[in-house]
Image: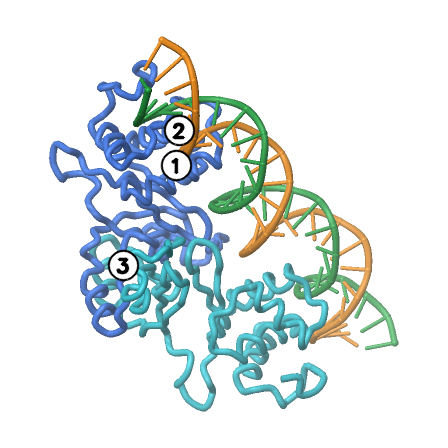
Chain colours: A cyan, B blue, C green, D orange
Amino acid sequence: MQVGKPSSGRSDFPPRVQAALSVLRTQHERVTRARQAVIEVLDGTEEHLAADEIVARAEASAPGVHRATVYRALSTLGELGLVTHTHVGGSATVYHLAVPEPTGPATSVPHAHLQCTNCQAVIDIPADALDSLIRRVDREVGFHVEPHHAALLGLCADCRRSSLPETGQKPQS
Amino acid sequence: MQVGKPSSGRSDFPPRVQAALSVLRTQHERVTRARQAVIEVLDGTEEHLAADEIVARAEASAPGVHRATVYRALSTLGELGLVTHTHVGGSATVYHLAVPEPTGPATSVPHAHLQCTNCQAVIDIPADALDSLIRRVDREVGFHVEPHHAALLGLCADCRRSSLPETGQKPQS
DNA sequence: TCCCAGATGCGATAGCGTCGCAACTGCTTC
DNA sequence: GAAGCAGTTGCGACGCTATCGCATCTGGGA
């Protein structure tokens, strides 16, 4: 990161960042330092980042960027379809860049999320695991499930093995 | 409601309330006014109640009951398996009484939840709608999904019909 | 370079939930 | 029926996530 000062026409951005910025321009949305920083942060990781964490990391390319600004940037980018968010647990929300690699549709394939109520780990699963559920719910109650939008809760393999026989641990969520 | 002053041995409680209270006694947990009130509130409705709403309704049988006390009661009842909770949207958590009618296993059948991100409505679906997903996830990643524990988000039938062609509405979650 | 709609920084505010602590009370024992 | 104590309650403070209003700043079109 920090490969130079962010000038909006800069061409040394990673491909997905460039793609996202050009969508902004196409949509007549302003390309600001805060938005660039948020996109760079999301592009630079495979993790599930909470807003908090995005603010912290955005400091690198946009020093002094404010929480509220990051929330607003995430909201704008979400409306443009550049970012998706997922509600995990009962509290935090995590964000993803929804821009495919221009070099091929390899990364950021649609996926759903599982979260362990014991260790809080978030696990990705292919979105198609929910296909039959989605079809059934659509057919029976006309509801359109967005599989990425909320994490399914439960116990991960590790926690099932280790914490079930009474250790002092207690699940949170 | 309010059919008399709450004395712990009282026998004019609805059957599920009595059943829940007797579980408390069996487990050597104290039967307090706050816990009784919470159980009565949950027994008295089919709605999905948030903690907030439970506090308000509990006022009837336990005047002055405090938010923190209701949260603690819900937590204790949850550990005993008498109450389950579901995370809906990104914020509120809703609670259910998990005590079956002693007269038959009719009500409080296991169910999962859908929530509309546009109108916030919560829809119940039979838990078995998730069965194949649960089996697949178990088989492939060893994760045990608890289908009631988090709502699946998406768009309900009404909102798909009415709000999709650009009305001014914007989804929240 | 000018200009202004739109974005930002900031602090205040709101909602949900938890914590520590002193006072109270179920429940057991006598 | 009274005593004692561990567990529960009431209360306010606190933490976290997220949003809002408003004055200031700035991206980008002319």
User: Residue at left 55%, top 77%?
Assistant: A23
Nearest the viewer among A19 and A150 is A150
Horizontal side, residue A102 vs residue C1: left or right: left
Tell me the chain of label 2. B
Return the residue at label 2: B34
Q: Quadrant of the N terminus of chain B?
A: top left
Return the residue at label 3: A165
The location of residue B121, given as percent across then percent down, is 36, 46
User: Residue at left 18%, top 56%?
Assistant: B128
User: Residue at left 40%, top 67%?
Assistant: A121
Image quarter for residue B19? top left
Near mark 2 (Cα within 10 A), the count class, few <14, some 14-19 or many ≥20, is many
Image quarter for residue A63? bottom right
Callout 1 secondary element: helix
Q: Are marks 1 and 2 in contact (CB under 8 Å)?
A: yes
Callout 2 secondary element: helix
Return the residue at label 1: B73
Sequence-wise first label, 1 or 2 = 2
Nearest the viewer among A82 and A167 is A167
Tell me the chain of label 3. A
Callout 3 secondary element: loop
The location of residue A141, given as percent across then percent down, is 24, 53
Horizontal side, residue B10 vs residue B50: left or right: left
Near mark 3 (Cα within 10 A), the count class, few <14, some 14-19 or many ≥20, is few
Q: Mark 2 belongs to which amino acid? A: Ala
